[in-house]
Protein backbone atom coordinates (compact mmCIF):
# COMPACT_ATOMS: atom_id res chain seq x y z
CA UNK A 1 0.00 0.00 0.00
CA UNK A 2 1.37 3.37 -1.06
CA UNK A 3 2.11 5.68 1.87
CA UNK A 4 0.35 9.06 1.93
CA UNK A 5 2.87 11.91 1.59
CA UNK A 6 3.22 14.04 4.69
CA UNK A 7 3.30 17.82 4.92
CA UNK A 8 6.23 19.35 6.82
CA UNK A 9 6.01 23.08 7.51
CA UNK A 10 9.27 24.83 8.40
CA UNK A 11 9.66 28.33 9.81
CA UNK A 12 12.16 30.18 11.93
CA UNK A 13 9.94 29.82 15.02
CA UNK A 14 7.55 27.15 16.21
CA UNK A 15 3.92 28.21 16.69
CA UNK A 16 4.58 27.62 20.41
CA UNK A 17 7.18 29.44 22.53
CA UNK A 18 8.97 27.89 25.50
CA UNK A 19 10.06 30.14 28.37
CA UNK A 20 11.03 29.89 32.02
CA UNK A 21 8.88 31.74 34.54
CA UNK A 22 9.95 31.76 38.20
CA UNK A 23 12.05 28.66 37.65
CA UNK A 24 9.32 26.71 35.86
CA UNK A 25 9.09 25.98 32.15
CA UNK A 26 5.92 27.06 30.42
CA UNK A 27 4.59 27.04 26.88
CA UNK A 28 2.41 29.61 25.18
CA UNK A 29 1.15 30.15 21.62
CA UNK A 30 3.30 32.35 19.39
CA UNK A 31 1.74 35.40 17.76
CA UNK A 32 2.10 36.81 14.26
CA UNK A 33 0.72 36.56 10.76
CA UNK A 34 2.62 33.38 9.93
CA UNK A 35 0.93 31.39 12.70
CA UNK A 36 -2.49 32.83 11.76
CA UNK A 37 -2.04 31.81 8.14
CA UNK A 38 -0.35 28.42 8.39
CA UNK A 39 -2.10 26.98 11.44
CA UNK A 40 -5.41 26.30 9.63
CA UNK A 41 -3.60 24.63 6.72
CA UNK A 42 -1.67 22.15 8.85
CA UNK A 43 -4.17 21.66 11.68
CA UNK A 44 -5.50 18.12 12.05
CA UNK A 45 -3.71 16.90 8.91
CA UNK A 46 -0.84 15.27 10.75
CA UNK A 47 2.66 16.08 9.62
CA UNK A 48 5.20 18.33 11.29
CA UNK A 49 5.97 21.95 12.04
CA UNK A 50 9.70 22.51 12.55
CA UNK A 51 11.25 25.60 14.09
CA UNK A 52 13.14 27.15 16.99
CA UNK A 53 11.15 26.94 20.28
CA UNK A 54 12.18 30.46 21.33
CA UNK A 55 14.63 29.72 24.14
CA UNK A 56 18.42 29.34 24.26
CA UNK A 57 18.44 27.79 27.73
CA UNK A 58 19.47 24.17 27.97
CA UNK A 59 16.62 21.74 28.49
CA UNK A 60 16.46 17.98 28.74
CA UNK A 61 14.83 16.04 25.94
CA UNK A 62 12.33 14.66 28.44
CA UNK A 63 11.27 18.15 29.60
CA UNK A 64 10.90 19.39 26.04
CA UNK A 65 8.83 16.35 25.12
CA UNK A 66 6.60 16.84 28.16
CA UNK A 67 5.95 20.44 27.08
CA UNK A 68 5.62 20.00 23.33
CA UNK A 69 3.82 16.64 23.38
CA UNK A 70 0.43 17.89 24.63
CA UNK A 71 0.74 20.96 22.37
CA UNK A 72 1.27 18.67 19.39
CA UNK A 73 -1.81 16.64 20.26
CA UNK A 74 -4.04 19.70 20.64
CA UNK A 75 -2.80 21.33 17.42
CA UNK A 76 -3.16 18.24 15.26
CA UNK A 77 0.45 18.18 14.07
CA UNK A 78 3.81 17.28 15.58
CA UNK A 79 6.07 20.10 16.79
CA UNK A 80 9.68 19.50 15.79
CA UNK A 81 12.10 21.74 17.74
CA UNK A 82 15.42 23.01 16.38
CA UNK A 83 17.53 23.98 19.39
CA UNK A 84 19.77 27.05 19.01
CA UNK A 85 22.41 28.64 21.20
CA UNK A 86 22.46 32.34 22.06
CA UNK A 87 25.41 32.86 19.68
CA UNK A 88 23.53 31.14 16.85
CA UNK A 89 20.47 33.29 17.48
CA UNK A 90 22.63 36.41 17.50
CA UNK A 91 24.28 35.69 14.14
CA UNK A 92 21.43 33.95 12.35
CA UNK A 93 18.36 35.80 13.64
CA UNK A 94 19.45 39.19 14.97
CA UNK A 95 22.36 39.25 12.55
CA UNK A 96 21.81 38.12 8.96
CA UNK A 97 18.03 37.72 9.06
CA UNK A 98 17.17 41.01 10.74
CA UNK A 99 20.23 43.16 10.08
CA UNK A 100 20.65 42.23 6.39
CA UNK A 101 17.65 40.56 4.76
CA UNK A 102 14.84 42.31 6.65
CA UNK A 103 15.99 45.91 6.07
CA UNK A 104 17.22 45.24 2.52
CA UNK A 105 14.02 43.52 1.41
CA UNK A 106 11.97 46.36 2.93
CA UNK A 107 13.99 49.03 1.05
CA UNK A 108 15.84 50.22 4.16
CA UNK A 109 19.31 49.39 2.83
CA UNK A 110 20.92 52.10 4.96
CA UNK A 111 20.05 50.00 8.04
CA UNK A 112 21.93 46.91 6.77
CA UNK A 113 25.02 45.51 8.50
CA UNK A 114 26.81 43.28 5.97
CA UNK A 115 29.03 41.50 8.48
CA UNK A 116 30.59 38.28 7.08
CA UNK A 117 30.11 36.52 10.43
CA UNK A 118 26.38 37.00 10.06
CA UNK A 119 26.44 35.16 6.74
CA UNK A 120 28.48 32.30 8.24
CA UNK A 121 26.07 32.05 11.17
CA UNK A 122 23.09 32.11 8.81
CA UNK A 123 24.42 29.13 6.87
CA UNK A 124 25.36 27.24 10.04
CA UNK A 125 21.84 27.46 11.50
CA UNK A 126 20.26 26.48 8.18
CA UNK A 127 22.50 23.40 8.18
CA UNK A 128 21.19 22.57 11.66
CA UNK A 129 17.59 22.88 10.39
CA UNK A 130 18.54 20.59 7.50
CA UNK A 131 19.91 17.91 9.83
CA UNK A 132 16.77 17.96 11.99
CA UNK A 133 14.48 17.70 8.96
CA UNK A 134 16.50 14.93 7.35
CA UNK A 135 16.09 12.90 10.53
CA UNK A 136 12.31 12.72 9.97
CA UNK A 137 11.78 13.36 6.23
CA UNK A 138 10.86 10.42 4.00
CA UNK A 139 10.66 10.00 0.25
CA UNK A 140 7.50 11.59 -1.12
CA UNK A 141 7.08 14.12 1.70
CA UNK A 142 6.23 17.73 0.90
CA UNK A 143 8.49 20.24 2.70
CA UNK A 144 7.08 23.76 2.87
CA UNK A 145 9.77 26.28 3.92
CA UNK A 146 8.64 29.70 5.06
CA UNK A 147 10.33 33.07 4.91
CA UNK A 148 13.67 34.78 4.62
CA UNK A 149 15.36 33.11 7.60
CA UNK A 150 15.59 29.77 5.76
CA UNK A 151 16.42 30.57 2.13
CA UNK A 152 19.40 28.12 1.92
CA UNK A 153 17.42 25.21 3.37
CA UNK A 154 16.07 23.88 0.07
CA UNK A 155 19.53 23.48 -1.45
CA UNK A 156 20.77 21.76 1.71
CA UNK A 157 17.83 19.35 1.75
CA UNK A 158 18.31 18.58 -1.94
CA UNK A 159 21.96 17.67 -1.36
CA UNK A 160 20.87 14.97 1.11
CA UNK A 161 19.67 12.84 -1.82
CA UNK A 162 16.16 12.10 -0.61
CA UNK A 163 13.21 12.28 -2.99
CA UNK A 164 10.76 14.83 -1.67
CA UNK A 165 9.26 18.04 -2.99
CA UNK A 166 10.15 21.46 -1.61
CA UNK A 167 8.37 24.80 -1.69
CA UNK A 168 9.54 28.19 -0.44
CA UNK A 169 7.17 31.03 0.45
CA UNK A 170 8.57 34.53 1.02
CA UNK A 171 6.23 36.39 3.37
CA UNK A 172 8.04 39.72 3.12
CA UNK A 173 8.58 41.81 -0.04
CA UNK A 174 11.30 40.97 -2.56
CA UNK A 175 13.25 44.12 -3.49
CA UNK A 176 13.85 45.53 -6.98
CA UNK A 177 17.15 44.66 -8.64
CA UNK A 178 18.91 47.96 -7.94
CA UNK A 179 18.42 47.40 -4.19
CA UNK A 180 19.02 43.64 -4.19
CA UNK A 181 22.35 44.16 -5.99
CA UNK A 182 23.79 45.86 -2.91
CA UNK A 183 23.92 42.61 -0.98
CA UNK A 184 27.35 40.93 -1.08
CA UNK A 185 25.78 37.44 -1.23
CA UNK A 186 23.33 38.21 -4.04
CA UNK A 187 24.40 35.31 -6.30
CA UNK A 188 24.26 32.86 -3.42
CA UNK A 189 20.77 33.96 -2.29
CA UNK A 190 19.33 33.80 -5.82
CA UNK A 191 20.92 30.41 -6.42
CA UNK A 192 19.54 29.05 -3.15
CA UNK A 193 16.03 30.29 -3.89
CA UNK A 194 16.22 28.58 -7.27
CA UNK A 195 16.80 25.16 -5.68
CA UNK A 196 13.17 24.76 -4.59
CA UNK A 197 10.54 23.08 -6.74
CA UNK A 198 8.24 26.03 -6.16
CA UNK A 199 9.10 29.59 -5.09
CA UNK A 200 6.16 31.77 -4.14
CA UNK A 201 5.70 35.47 -3.38
CA UNK A 202 2.89 37.56 -1.93
CA UNK A 203 2.35 39.81 -4.96
CA UNK A 204 3.03 40.05 -8.69
CA UNK A 205 5.33 42.96 -7.91
CA UNK A 206 7.55 40.78 -5.71
CA UNK A 207 7.58 37.98 -8.28
CA UNK A 208 8.50 40.45 -11.00
CA UNK A 209 11.41 41.79 -8.93
CA UNK A 210 12.69 38.24 -8.39
CA UNK A 211 12.40 37.38 -12.08
CA UNK A 212 14.22 40.60 -13.02
CA UNK A 213 17.11 39.63 -10.74
CA UNK A 214 17.29 36.16 -12.30
CA UNK A 215 17.48 37.73 -15.77
CA UNK A 216 20.28 40.06 -14.70
CA UNK A 217 22.45 37.56 -12.84
CA UNK A 218 21.86 34.36 -14.85
CA UNK A 219 22.16 34.69 -18.66
CA UNK A 220 20.71 31.20 -19.33
CA UNK A 221 17.47 32.12 -17.52
CA UNK A 222 14.23 31.39 -19.40
CA UNK A 223 10.57 31.42 -18.34
CA UNK A 224 7.25 30.35 -19.80
CA UNK A 225 3.57 30.44 -18.90
CA UNK A 226 1.21 33.13 -17.73
CA UNK A 227 -1.02 33.86 -14.78
CA UNK A 228 -0.10 33.34 -11.14
CA UNK A 229 2.42 30.53 -11.69
CA UNK A 230 5.31 30.53 -14.21
CA UNK A 231 7.77 27.83 -15.21
CA UNK A 232 11.45 28.78 -15.02
CA UNK A 233 14.49 27.10 -16.52
CA UNK A 234 17.84 27.85 -14.93
CA UNK A 235 21.16 26.02 -14.87
CA UNK A 236 19.70 22.92 -16.48
CA UNK A 237 16.73 22.45 -14.16
CA UNK A 238 13.13 23.62 -14.02
CA UNK A 239 11.12 25.04 -11.15
CA UNK A 240 7.97 27.11 -10.69
CA UNK A 241 7.62 30.71 -9.52
CA UNK A 242 4.27 31.99 -8.27
CA UNK A 243 2.49 34.96 -6.76
CA UNK A 244 -0.25 33.78 -4.40
CA UNK A 245 -1.16 36.10 -1.52
CA UNK A 246 -1.32 34.70 1.98
CA UNK A 247 -4.64 35.02 3.78
CA UNK A 248 -6.41 34.16 7.01
CA UNK A 249 -9.01 31.66 8.14
CA UNK A 250 -11.82 34.04 7.22
CA UNK A 251 -14.63 32.02 8.76
CA UNK A 252 -12.77 31.64 12.04
CA UNK A 253 -12.22 35.38 12.40
CA UNK A 254 -15.78 36.09 11.35
CA UNK A 255 -17.08 33.78 14.06
CA UNK A 256 -14.83 35.37 16.69
CA UNK A 257 -15.91 38.88 15.76
CA UNK A 258 -19.59 37.91 15.76
CA UNK A 259 -19.54 36.02 19.06
CA UNK A 260 -21.53 37.30 22.01
CA UNK A 261 -18.34 37.71 24.02
CA UNK A 262 -16.72 39.88 21.32
CA UNK A 263 -19.82 42.03 20.85
CA UNK A 264 -20.20 42.52 24.61
CA UNK A 265 -16.52 43.37 25.07
CA UNK A 266 -16.59 45.72 22.05
CA UNK A 267 -19.43 47.63 23.71
CA UNK A 268 -17.37 47.95 26.90
CA UNK A 269 -14.39 49.25 24.93
CA UNK A 270 -16.50 51.90 23.19
CA UNK A 271 -18.14 52.99 26.43
CA UNK A 272 -14.73 53.39 28.07
CA UNK A 273 -13.62 55.98 25.50
CA UNK A 274 -15.16 59.44 25.44
CA UNK A 275 -15.37 59.69 21.65
CA UNK A 276 -17.81 59.11 18.81
CA UNK A 277 -15.39 57.10 16.68
CA UNK A 278 -12.63 54.64 17.55
CA UNK A 279 -9.66 54.39 15.20
CA UNK A 280 -7.60 51.23 15.71
CA UNK A 281 -3.96 50.52 14.95
CA UNK A 282 -2.40 47.08 15.55
CA UNK A 283 1.28 46.78 14.67
CA UNK A 284 4.41 44.95 15.69
CA UNK A 285 7.17 47.23 16.91
CA UNK A 286 9.15 47.68 13.70
CA UNK A 287 10.36 50.60 11.60
CA UNK A 288 8.64 49.15 8.53
CA UNK A 289 5.17 49.50 10.11
CA UNK A 290 5.07 53.31 9.96
CA UNK A 291 3.77 53.86 13.51
CA UNK A 292 5.36 57.34 13.88
CA UNK A 293 3.90 58.31 10.49
CA UNK A 294 0.49 57.15 11.71
CA UNK A 295 0.74 59.27 14.84
CA UNK A 296 1.86 62.32 12.87
CA UNK A 297 -1.01 61.80 10.45
CA UNK A 298 -3.51 61.63 13.31
CA UNK A 299 -2.04 64.74 14.92
CA UNK A 300 -2.23 66.57 11.58
CA UNK A 301 -5.86 65.48 11.27
CA UNK A 302 -6.68 67.12 14.60
CA UNK A 303 -4.90 70.28 13.38
CA UNK A 304 -6.63 70.40 9.98
CA UNK A 305 -10.05 69.28 11.23
CA UNK A 306 -10.51 70.64 14.77
CA UNK A 307 -14.11 69.39 14.73
CA UNK A 308 -12.67 65.92 15.41
CA UNK A 309 -11.27 67.00 18.76
CA UNK A 310 -13.06 65.03 21.49
CA UNK A 311 -14.84 63.03 18.78
CA UNK A 312 -12.16 60.61 17.52
CA UNK A 313 -9.75 58.48 19.54
CA UNK A 314 -6.81 56.49 18.21
CA UNK A 315 -6.23 53.23 20.08
CA UNK A 316 -2.80 51.89 19.12
CA UNK A 317 -1.65 48.38 20.01
CA UNK A 318 2.11 47.90 19.71
CA UNK A 319 3.29 44.29 19.96
CA UNK A 320 6.85 44.07 21.39
CA UNK A 321 9.59 42.89 19.04
CA UNK A 322 13.40 42.69 19.21
CA UNK A 323 13.44 44.75 22.39
CA UNK A 324 17.17 44.14 22.93
CA UNK A 325 18.07 45.85 19.63
CA UNK A 326 19.05 49.50 20.02
CA UNK A 327 17.12 50.91 17.07
CA UNK A 328 13.92 49.20 18.27
CA UNK A 329 14.36 50.74 21.70
CA UNK A 330 14.80 54.11 20.00
CA UNK A 331 11.65 53.51 17.93
CA UNK A 332 9.64 52.74 21.08
CA UNK A 333 10.93 55.94 22.68
CA UNK A 334 9.97 57.92 19.57
CA UNK A 335 6.45 56.48 19.68
CA UNK A 336 6.10 57.27 23.37
CA UNK A 337 7.30 60.84 22.81
CA UNK A 338 4.87 61.42 19.93
CA UNK A 339 1.93 60.08 21.93
CA UNK A 340 2.92 62.24 24.89
CA UNK A 341 3.06 65.36 22.70
CA UNK A 342 -0.31 64.68 21.07
CA UNK A 343 -2.01 63.95 24.37
CA UNK A 344 -0.32 66.89 26.06
CA UNK A 345 -1.60 69.28 23.41
CA UNK A 346 -5.14 68.00 22.85
CA UNK A 347 -6.27 66.09 25.95
CA UNK A 348 -9.13 67.41 28.03
CA UNK A 349 -10.48 66.38 31.40
CA UNK A 350 -12.76 63.85 29.70
CA UNK A 351 -10.93 62.86 26.50
CA UNK A 352 -7.51 61.49 25.54
CA UNK A 353 -6.77 61.51 21.80
CA UNK A 354 -4.32 58.56 21.79
CA UNK A 355 -4.67 55.47 23.95
CA UNK A 356 -2.02 52.84 23.47
CA UNK A 357 -1.15 49.40 24.73
CA UNK A 358 2.36 47.92 24.58
CA UNK A 359 2.16 44.14 24.70
CA UNK A 360 0.60 41.08 23.12
CA UNK A 361 -3.19 40.85 22.92
CA UNK A 362 -5.20 37.64 23.13
CA UNK A 363 -7.19 36.51 20.10
CA UNK A 364 -10.47 37.16 21.91
CA UNK A 365 -9.51 40.70 22.94
CA UNK A 366 -8.20 41.46 19.46
CA UNK A 367 -11.47 40.30 17.89
CA UNK A 368 -13.35 42.61 20.26
CA UNK A 369 -11.09 45.53 19.36
CA UNK A 370 -11.66 44.90 15.66
CA UNK A 371 -15.39 44.75 16.28
CA UNK A 372 -15.36 47.99 18.29
CA UNK A 373 -13.24 49.96 15.83
CA UNK A 374 -15.00 52.32 13.43
CA UNK A 375 -11.78 52.51 11.43
CA UNK A 376 -8.61 50.44 11.09
CA UNK A 377 -5.55 52.57 10.28
CA UNK A 378 -2.60 50.76 8.69
CA UNK A 379 0.36 52.88 7.59
CA UNK A 380 3.11 50.38 6.68
CA UNK A 381 6.10 51.86 4.89
CA UNK A 382 6.63 48.45 3.26
CA UNK A 383 4.80 45.24 4.03
CA UNK A 384 4.72 41.82 2.41
CA UNK A 385 0.97 41.52 2.98
CA UNK A 386 -0.35 42.77 6.37
CA UNK A 387 -2.97 40.40 7.72
CA UNK A 388 -4.34 42.90 10.24
CA UNK A 389 -6.24 44.50 7.36
CA UNK A 390 -7.92 41.18 6.55
CA UNK A 391 -8.56 40.25 10.17
CA UNK A 392 -10.30 43.58 10.76
CA UNK A 393 -12.61 43.16 7.78
CA UNK A 394 -13.47 39.58 8.77
CA UNK A 395 -14.26 40.50 12.39
CA UNK A 396 -16.46 43.49 11.56
CA UNK A 397 -19.17 41.22 10.21
CA UNK A 398 -22.16 43.28 9.09
CA UNK A 399 -21.13 46.26 11.18
CA UNK A 400 -20.00 49.21 9.04
CA UNK A 401 -16.29 49.88 9.17
CA UNK A 402 -13.59 51.74 7.27
CA UNK A 403 -10.22 50.30 6.30
CA UNK A 404 -7.49 52.93 5.73
CA UNK A 405 -4.58 51.05 4.21
CA UNK A 406 -1.07 51.97 3.11
CA UNK A 407 -0.53 51.56 -0.61
CA UNK A 408 2.85 50.03 0.27
CA UNK A 409 1.26 46.99 1.96
CA UNK A 410 0.90 43.89 -0.19
CA UNK A 411 -2.75 43.70 0.85
CA UNK A 412 -3.42 46.99 -0.96
CA UNK A 413 -3.29 45.19 -4.30
CA UNK A 414 -6.18 42.96 -3.20
CA UNK A 415 -8.25 45.30 -1.07
CA UNK A 416 -8.00 48.51 -3.09
CA UNK A 417 -11.66 48.42 -4.21
CA UNK A 418 -12.92 48.55 -0.64
CA UNK A 419 -10.18 50.36 1.29
CA UNK A 420 -9.06 53.99 1.39
CA UNK A 421 -5.46 53.79 0.18
CA UNK A 422 -2.92 56.24 1.58
CA UNK A 423 0.74 57.18 1.22
CA UNK A 424 1.94 57.24 4.86
CA UNK A 425 4.70 59.71 3.95
CA UNK A 426 2.05 62.24 2.81
CA UNK A 427 0.88 63.51 6.19
CA UNK A 428 -1.75 65.95 4.86
CA UNK A 429 -3.45 63.36 2.66
CA UNK A 430 -3.24 60.81 5.46
CA UNK A 431 -5.02 63.30 7.70
CA UNK A 432 -7.65 63.89 4.99
CA UNK A 433 -8.20 60.12 4.67
CA UNK A 434 -8.85 59.85 8.42
CA UNK A 435 -11.36 62.70 8.20
CA UNK A 436 -13.02 61.06 5.19
CA UNK A 437 -13.37 57.80 7.11
CA UNK A 438 -14.79 59.69 10.10
CA UNK A 439 -17.37 61.47 7.92
CA UNK A 440 -18.39 58.50 5.75
CA UNK A 441 -22.02 57.44 5.85
CA UNK A 442 -22.84 53.90 6.98
CA UNK A 443 -24.27 52.97 3.58
CA UNK A 444 -20.98 53.80 1.84
CA UNK A 445 -19.02 51.94 4.51
CA UNK A 446 -21.10 48.81 3.93
CA UNK A 447 -20.66 49.03 0.15
CA UNK A 448 -16.89 49.36 0.45
CA UNK A 449 -16.61 46.56 3.00
CA UNK A 450 -18.77 44.31 0.83
CA UNK A 451 -16.24 44.70 -1.98
CA UNK A 452 -13.68 43.11 0.32
CA UNK A 453 -15.72 40.39 1.99
CA UNK A 454 -18.31 39.21 -0.58
CA UNK A 455 -17.86 35.65 -1.97
CA UNK A 456 -16.76 36.86 -5.40
CA UNK A 457 -13.72 38.65 -3.98
CA UNK A 458 -12.64 36.10 -1.37
CA UNK A 459 -8.88 36.19 -1.01
CA UNK A 460 -6.79 33.22 -2.14
CA UNK A 461 -5.63 31.23 0.87
CA UNK A 462 -2.50 29.20 1.47
CA UNK A 463 -4.62 26.07 1.00
CA UNK A 464 -5.22 27.22 -2.58
CA UNK A 465 -1.47 27.61 -2.97
CA UNK A 466 -0.90 24.04 -1.79
CA UNK A 467 -3.46 22.75 -4.27
CA UNK A 468 -1.88 24.70 -7.13
CA UNK A 469 1.55 23.29 -6.29
CA UNK A 470 0.17 19.75 -6.54
CA UNK A 471 -1.51 20.58 -9.84
CA UNK A 472 1.71 21.98 -11.26
CA UNK A 473 3.65 18.93 -10.17
Image (cartoon, rainbow, N blue to C red):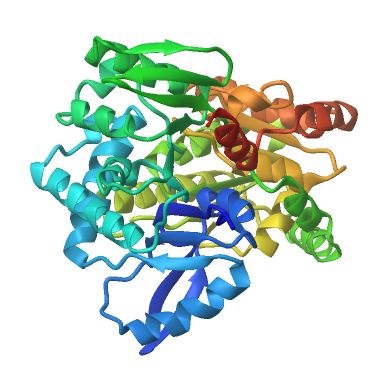
User: How far across and how far down the image is residue 407, in percent?
Assistant: 55, 23
Quadrant (top left, top right, bottom left, bottom right) of the N terminus: bottom right
Residue occupying image coordinates x 78% and y 38% = 401
Q: Position of residue 143 (x, y in %)?
A: 44, 48
Foreground pick, 415 / 5: 5
Given residues 347 and 110, the one toward you in this image is: 110
Above or below residue 73? Residue 44 is above
- In the rendered image of this protein, does residue 52 appear above or below residue 11? below
**Image-based side of 379 in relation to 451, left or right:** left
Q: Residue at x 62, y 37 (%)?
A: 467
Count of numbered labels shown in the rendering: 0
Res. 346 image quadrant:
top right
Residue at position x 41%, y 12% in the image: 223
Residue 247: name its quadrant. top right
Which residue is painted at 26% across and 20% down in the image? 235
Q: Where in the figure is residue 254, as x and y percent of width and height?
A: 78, 50
Q: Taking 317 as reference, is 80 above or below it? A: below
Amino acid sequence: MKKTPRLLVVSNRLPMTLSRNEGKWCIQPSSGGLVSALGPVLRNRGGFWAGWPGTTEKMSIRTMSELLGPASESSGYRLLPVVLSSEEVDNFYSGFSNSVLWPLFHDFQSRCDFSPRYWDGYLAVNRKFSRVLNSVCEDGDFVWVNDFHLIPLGEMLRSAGKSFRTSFFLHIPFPPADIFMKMPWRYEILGQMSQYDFVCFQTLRDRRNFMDCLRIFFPDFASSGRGHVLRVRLNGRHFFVGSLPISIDYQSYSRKGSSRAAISRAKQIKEGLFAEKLILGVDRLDYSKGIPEKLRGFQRCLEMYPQLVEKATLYQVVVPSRESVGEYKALKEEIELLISRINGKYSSTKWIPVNWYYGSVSGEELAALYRAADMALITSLKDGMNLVSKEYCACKGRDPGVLILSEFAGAALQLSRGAILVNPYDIDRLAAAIFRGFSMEDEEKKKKMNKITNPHTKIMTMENMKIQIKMKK
